[in-house]
Amino acid sequence: MDLHKEDDRGSAKQKKVKIVFVIGGPGSGKGTQCKRIAQQFGYTHLSVGEILRQEISSGSETGSMIQKIMKEGKLVPSDVTVRLLQQAMQGINSDKFLIDGFPRNEENVKAFEDLTKMEPEFVLYLDCPQDEMEKRLLSRNEGREDDNVETIRKRFKVFMESTLPTIEYYESKGKIRKVDAGKSVDEVFESIKVIFSQGKDYNKVPPSRHKCKCLIL
Ligand SMILES: Nc1ncnc2c1ncn2[C@@H]1O[C@H](COP(=O)(O)OP(=O)(O)O)[C@@H](O)[C@H]1O
Ligand SMILES: Nc1ccn([C@@H]2O[C@H](COP(=O)(O)OP(=O)(O)O)[C@@H](O)[C@H]2O)c(=O)n1
Ligand SMILES: [Mg+2]
């Protein structure tokens, strides 16, 4: 994928596309905060969950496979997810992408790195207590098939088992920017604004203080 764009004069000099991943448990407020970040900081917001739900709506065979997996609270195979994400990015003329709900496991990370040869500038981690996330999901009212107690609990398990290791991986690279997402929408956004305003050195977790026991990429 060539996501490197020419500069304004159309010369061969390449302009780098900036990517920020936004991760956090189900109901931590990723979609809510991404809308605000996109508006205030000029990012293009892409929700990977939305991209997958659009594929379901298209009625394709891939869509029905995705639907079954989502209903179970499991993760869609990374080759499918990253291909759809890549297509969405290529269809938009932007040099700043906010990618919501990605990566969710080691396979997502590897597929993205292999296919795009790109790395995120940083990874915003919305850290929220589970009981608060459950409460939010049960009153989300978006008609989602996966917002029921049974599937929500499975999604929490997937988050703990598969997504947390990716957070450790990015911590080891000094790329995690963590915020307390258990507060009000406005309070969370205040913390996020500081991160996006101050650039990559804010709230950096020194890599040496964290062991990365899990990811061999
Ligand atoms: N800080 C917050 N406090 C209370 N409710 C919130 C907060 N952030 C989001 N919500 C609500 O919780 C639900 C889940 O938020 P959403 O942004 O969809 O989370 P995610 O994309 O991480 O699953 C939505 O109904 C949203 O309006
Ligand atoms: N990288 C991703 C993102 C979402 N998904 C699937 O899509 C579902 C919904 O993702 P989402 O990001 O819209 O969910 P929320 O965390 O926003 O509630 C997940 O539970 C997975 O089944 C995936 O498999 N891989
Ligand atoms: Mg969401």
Image: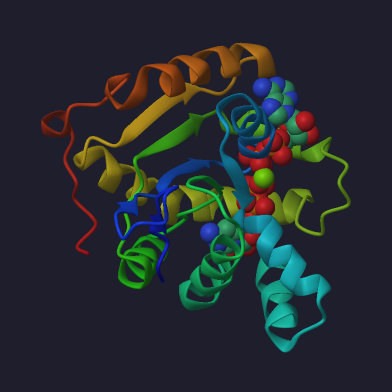
Q: Up-down: is 5 above or below 192?
A: below
Q: Quadrant of residue 14?
A: bottom left
**Residue 212 visible in the current orientation:** yes
Q: Write the residue at 17% across / 27% down.
A: 206
Spot occupied by residue 139 in the image (x, y as percentages of width and height): 84, 35
> What residue do we see at 39% from left, 46% from top?
164
94 in relation to 189, above or below: below
Left or right for 206, reference 158: left
Q: Is residue 140 above or below residue 78?
A: above
Residue closest to the eye, 183 or 188: 188
| 155 or 40: nearer the viewer | 40
Compared across the picture, whether 66 is left or right of 56 comes to: left
Please tell me how many numbered marks the rendered image carries: 0
Q: Which x, y percent locates residue 172?
A: 20, 41
Is residue 136 among what the camera can see?
A: no
Q: Does 190 sit above or below residue 48?
A: above
**In the displayed structure, does residue 10 sit left or right of residue 142?**
left
Closer to us: 16 or 167: 16
